Image (cartoon, helix red, strand yellow):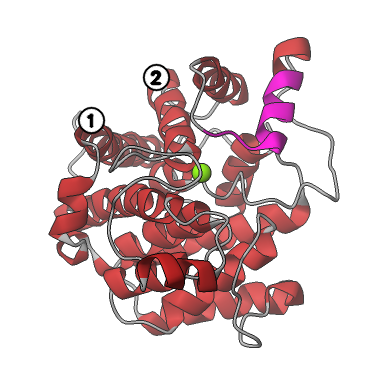
Amino acid sequence: MPTVLDPKIEQRAIAAYLGLALGDALGATVEFMTPREIQEHYGVHRALIGGGWLRLPKGRVTDDTEMSLALGHAILTHGGLDARAIAEAFSDWMRRKPVDIGHTVRRGLSLYRRTGVTAMPEHEFDAGNGACMRCLPIALYMLGATTDQLDRANQLQAHITHHNALSDRGTLTVLQLVHCGLRGGSREDLHACITALVAAEPRFAFDGRRQDNPGGYIVETLRAVFQALLSTTSFEAALIDVVNRGGDADTTGAILGMIAGAFYGLDALPMRWLKALERETAQHCQRQAVALLALGAGREQLGNIGL
Ligand SMILES: [Mg+2]
């Protein structure tokens, strides 16, 4: 039986996926630069022009979007969540010699190839943002799930490369923020969700000093994302804010892009950015957004959470 999706949620899901890709592409230009260097080179960086240390063509995305698409592909082809199918999809992606790959990701996938193990041992130094940056397909497939189910679903994909409680907790909040946006939640709802994270894990407190030069550490990444999200009132302004903080700008851009895309919706994505984004990537993101929502809705109807 075909599943009828709420067209508003579908549009917001597409906006979240395109938002992720736009944030990745916009941020990649200034990754590893300081705010001062960005200012000297670009004034305010606000154009999808490629370049950066990876010397990307205009509109090209990096590992953040590519690993999300690999995860989404695994969920869709397997018809649900399976750690081995996801690890295989990540491994296939690594085989295609991606333009960029984090060292924690490479280490986890190398271990998988050698041993078939799909969960790294827990490691206190794995609190990087590499599992968070690719979590969007989990949010789309698990819409309507309980917090516990959402958390377990995410850990299945995350622990293939990153097994760390702080990273898991931060990523759970990002998933909840995307859900809040997809459901048409308010700014207060977003704020409440972030406040709950800070209450549970005070290291994420974001209302102190401005987080410039956010590194790969999940705490710095999410502090920058929260500050940019809550201090602006449009998709465009939020994304420009976060990438001009420099540091791991493609990943702060990707994470902010998925949340702000879901929250502000498709009409809020600047047309000049959408036009610059690689066409094949944009189409892939759109197709996956719709398909993951539909598969997830089927899961809901059948009562088959599988977790
Ligand atoms: Mg990247």
In the image, residue 305 lies at what x, y percent?
50, 38
Q: Quadrant of residue 211 in the image? A: bottom right
Q: Is residue 18 magenta?
A: no
- Residue at label 1? 280
Q: Quadrant of the C terminus?
A: top right
* Magenta highlight range: 100-111
Mark 2 falls on what kind of element?
A: helix
In the image, residue 116 lies at what x, y percent?
73, 14
Compared to residue 247, the image places residue 66 above or below, namely above
State left or right for residue 126 relative to residue 273. Answer: right
- Residue at label 2? 77
State left or right for residue 29 relative to residue 111. Answer: left
Mark 1 falls on what kind of element?
A: helix
Amino acid type, residue under disc 2 in the picture: Thr
N-terminal-most mark, 2 or 1: 2
Residue that appears at 31% across and 60% down: 261
Q: Nearer the viewer, residue 122 or 78?
A: 122
Q: Quadrant of residue 32 in the image? A: bottom right
